[in-house]
Amino acid sequence: MQTSKPALSLWDKAKAFGMVILLTLFMLFLFQNIQQVEVSFLFWTVSTPRALLLLVTLSIGLIVGYLFAQTRMSSSNRQ
């Protein structure tokens, strides 16, 4: 006995299409930013692709923003 898969809703199709678009834009970003850049911080100098540098910077910003939001939420819950 074969079970049929439920049809994808319009919203699911739109999400899948959006993910494909975002992945395509991300890949274009990576391929256009492969130049090596030199970053100096205090005593360290690192040579890395620009795309990696931007992604690391974005990740650090997201983590700091998340932690800041968590501390604000926990301090507002105490009051």
Image: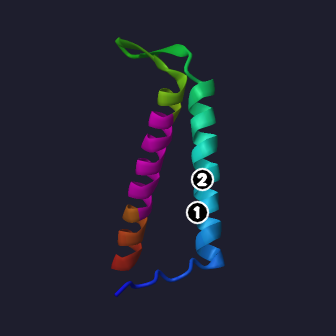
Rendered view: 4 above or below 20: below
Provide the major secondary structure of the magenta segment: helix
Residue 75 falls within the magenta-colored stretch: no
Rendered view: 47 above or below 75: above
Point out residue 48 in the picture as x, y percentages from the top left corner.
45, 18
Q: Quadrant of the N terminus?
A: bottom left
Point out residue 19 in the picture as x, y percentages from the top left corner.
58, 56
- Quickly name the residue at label 2: 20
Q: Residue at x 63, y 59 (%)?
A: 18
| Residue type, numbered disc 1 | Ala
The reply to whether the C-beta atoms of the residues labelled 1 and 2 are less than 8 Å apart is: yes
Circle 1 crowding by C-alpha within 10 Å: few under 14, some 14–19, many from 20: few
Q: Look at the image and give the residue range highlighted in magenta.
A: 55-69
Q: Secondary structure at mark 2?
A: helix
- Quickly name the residue at label 1: 16
| Residue type, numbered disc 2 | Val
